[in-house]
Amino acid sequence: MKKLNFLIVMDEISKINYKKDTSLAMAWAISERGHGLSYCKIDDLWLDQGVLKIDAQPLSVFRDPDHFYELGDVATVAVTEFDVILMRKDPPFDMNFLYALHLLDYAKRAGVWVVNDPLSVKDCNEKLFATQFSDLMSPTIVTNKQAHIREFIKTHGDVIVKPLDGMGGMGIFRLTADSPNIGSTLEMLTQLGTTPIMAQKFIPAITEGDKRVLIVGGKPVDYCLARIPSTGETRGNLAAGGRGVAMPLSERERQLAETIVPILLEKGLYFVGLDVIGGLITEINVTSPTCVREIDDQCGTQIAVDFIEFIENNIATKAA
């Protein structure tokens, strides 16, 4: 096996959750398989005469909650020092995130394999991308106009509204026809009608869990994580207090995943989190999907290792 040099672009490593962080699992897999590993944040990417440079730090990782990483000295290196870049920056998908994706496209053009493909991440908003498969979704609209959303609520009676750029359940509200705060909620989310949001018919099966189905290298992982809302809560997101229960994929969930796989492969999206409630797609997460650690801990899988093995086996043909 050829030794590869990996760069992982992520949030501040000192602030990650040792018990749950998927990027850390990837870093362990890279290190334990003998590859080189460096780290940076998105503000460490910069251009010099059209060449992408990176203020990177060598990264060592350990399976010790009290000492799980060490960083070496910062050094400015050309992007071609790396074979693979893993883009693992969490949303929100703001302008700085967008600029980073544009910069990472310079890496792709220089022959470095960027996973997931930066231009596809740019093009595939995690809420909007799912609407390309609208026949597999609960009824959904995207608009900045209160009138359309009010009519949608009137038609369906029970609706979820959410921003297009959030994560972890932030900004998600459930509205019914008799909700007293429809106007103020929509004013806030649409920023007084200037920003489009998503409205979806509520799916009662959320009580059984918002299921995260991971797709690695075009193959659905055999287990998903059902994120079950806490009492009195609509959102199943773990960040919103949901409880994560791993379970085998149902036939329907596998079918949904396999339906979108050809599009994912075409777009260079090799590590994806499909969100499913009641057998219906709600989102397709392409930025920094999580839940690897919970599934591994409960089912004995090694999802991050499978991902790195996929890269090892395909870098010769998949790199730009």
Image (cartoon, grey):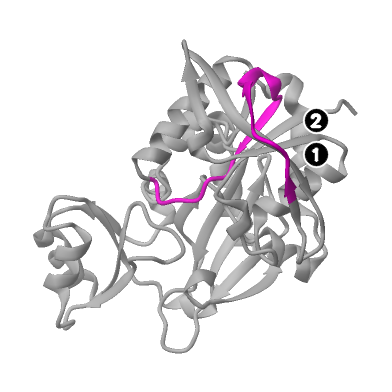
Is residue 81 one of those drawn in magenta?
Answer: yes
Residue 309 in the image, given as x and y percentages of width and height:
80, 39
The type of residue carrying mark 2 is Asn
Residue found 81% across the figure and 63% down from its top: 64
The spot of residue 98 in percent (x, y) is 39, 36
For residue 200, side relative to residue 193 (left or right): right
Say if 53 sits above or below 118 in the image: above
Spot occupied by residue 199 in the image (x, y as percentages of width and height): 27, 61
Of the pair 226 and 181, the residue shown nearer to us: 181
Residue 135, given in percent of the width and then of the height, sits at 40, 52
Q: Is residue 48 above or below residue 88?
A: above
| Residue that lies at the very extreme toward the front in this rendered image | 73
Q: From the viewer's perspective, is 80 left or right of 233?
A: right
SS at badge 2? helix
Residue ID for mark 2: 313
- Residue 305 visible somewhere in the drawing: no
Question: In which quadrant is the C terminus drawn?
Answer: top right
In contact (CB < 8 Å): disc 1 and disc 2: yes
Vertical comparison of 134 with 98: above or below: below
**Looking at the image, which is closer to me, 118 or 55?**
55
Q: CA distance from mark 1 to mark 2?
A: 6 Å
Residue at coordinates 74% horizontally, 33% vertically from top-left? 311
Type of amino acid at the residue the image marks with label 1 = Glu
Q: Residue furthest bottom?
A: 231
63 in the magenta segment: no
**Residue lying at the far right of the rendered structure:** 1
**Can residue 315 be seen?**
yes
Residue ID at (68%, 39%)? 217
Say which residue label 1 marks: 309
Residue 299: which numbered mark, if any?
A: none
Outermost residue toward the left in this view? 147
Region of the chain picked out in magenta, as a range: 70-93
